[in-house]
Amino acid sequence: MSPVPITAEPVKTFKIDGQDVSARETESILQAARAHNIDIPTLCHLEGLSSTGACRLCMVEIKGSNKLLPACVTRVQEGIEVVTNSERLVKYRRMIMELIFSERNHVCAVCVVNGHCELQSTAQKLGMDHVRYPYLNPQLDVDASHERFAIDHNRCILCTRCVRVCDEIETAHTWDVMGRGIGSKVITDFNQPWGESETCTRCGKCVNVCPTGALFEKGKSVAEMAKQRQFLPYLVSRREAMIE
Amino acid sequence: MSAQDKPRFATLWLDGCSGCHMSFLDMDEWLLDLAGQVEVVYSPLVDAKEFPDNVDITLIEGAVASREDIEKLLKIRARTKTLIAFGDCAVTANVPSMRNPFGLEAVMKQVYLDSNAIQPQVPTVTVPELLDRVVPVHRIVKVDVYIPGCPPSAATIKSVVSELLAGKKPDVMALTRFGA
Ligand code: SF4
Ligand code: SF4
Ligand code: SF4
Ligand code: FES
């Protein structure tokens, strides 16, 4: 998390799971919760990138409202009472995980990131021991045209971390999302093969922020691909230092 | 304890690689303990032709890939108290389901007709008819306990089976995960 700048930014005081907490008014409920060691599961969120609210795993309740709100994109407010772990939330999070697994083809036993995957470890943490929905088993491509990297759409959960890191940190904007709903997919340039992309600098940032086995380095076999994320907080803090 | 009042225990193997059963055998000397605690009434590891009645615990390895698998499962479910989906193939359909995106016909053609065999032909007699899609066990029958893992470790199997024998509800996801 970025260091707290010494400004006159107003601070809000409220409750998370009955605990009194405070945060700067521009902070999200997720940031406030993490600063107080309260765990809210996330998948699309990654500290250092903007938040989009794509996966809905971080949903929380606010007392007095029936709506579920994604903690990563909801700002803190004075006096609210946030609930992070009600029976309803546990049920919905489990449903979200099962829907993600049923939507594409996840075969952990033969996956490059087996044992290093955020989707897999989150499923375990949330106690998902099977998927109640029928697997859709769509036929999806693998693009291995790039000289160093490959994308396996079978494992993509459309979290858009690749899109955001390439745009916000590398500023190449090679990735984007095409299509709608269940037919969406991430694309490089104008849906050209990644290897023919004119914008990609081959920096590998997208590969390293990808939470699953969708983006990987070529030459890695089953369970060999572990992601390296140290660069992200470093680059973000360097950039903030330059702006100040 | 006489054989009559011991829990009746069975294992079965559908569309799997036998890896889960190998992991079961990896329990080594605990198998002797288990043999003392239960009566193994049906398994690829023992000589029994027909799946018997009144089974207390059945471990099912493998996904459901053929009509024959479905028939076996329906019979076993009717005769088993606690049915366990044993390993990733049983729980998610795992590797056997990797043919699903392509469809059965395309896969059969690729394997039997386009593979430069001496007499290219799709086998149709004496082999069970394959389903168009391979599915997990719980899509066909009710499952009581799921043990993910490819294969689940011997320690996981031991822990889950001993908890069940002790009448407890095991916290399986604290022990294993998909692809473990
Ligand atoms: S991406 Fe993760 S959850 Fe999906 S198959 Fe690979 S290891 Fe399993
Ligand atoms: S390698 Fe770097 S430049 Fe290329 S797509 Fe990934 S993040 Fe963008
Ligand atoms: S490729 Fe990876 S980072 Fe990009 S959207 Fe898919 S899962 Fe997320
Ligand atoms: S982490 Fe908040 S919506 Fe994905």
Image (cartoon, rainbow, N blue to C red):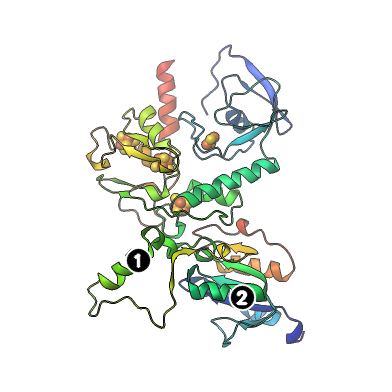
Ligand number 3: quarter of image:
top left
Residue annotated with mark 2: B76
Return the x and y of residue A78 as percentages of the image width and height: 68, 19
Q: Is residue A136 above or below residue B131?
A: above
Foreground of the two, B63 or A2: B63
Residue annotated with mark 1: B105
Q: For residue A160, which numbered disc appears in the image? A: none
Q: Nearer the viewer, mark 1 or mark 2?
A: 1
Which residue sits at x=37%, y=53%?
A: A139
Instruction: Identify which amino acid the numbered label 2 is placed on.
Output: Ile
Return the x and y of residue A42 as percentages of the image width and height: 54, 39
Instruction: Identify which amino acid the numbered label 1 is placed on.
Output: Glu
Q: Which of marks 1 and 2 is nearer the N terminus?
A: 2
Residue B117 shown left or right of residue B32 in the figure: left
State the image quarter where residue B125 is shown. Answer: bottom left
Residue B77 shown left or right of residue A50 in the figure: right
What's the distance in space between the residues labelled 1 and 2, CA to CA? 29 Å
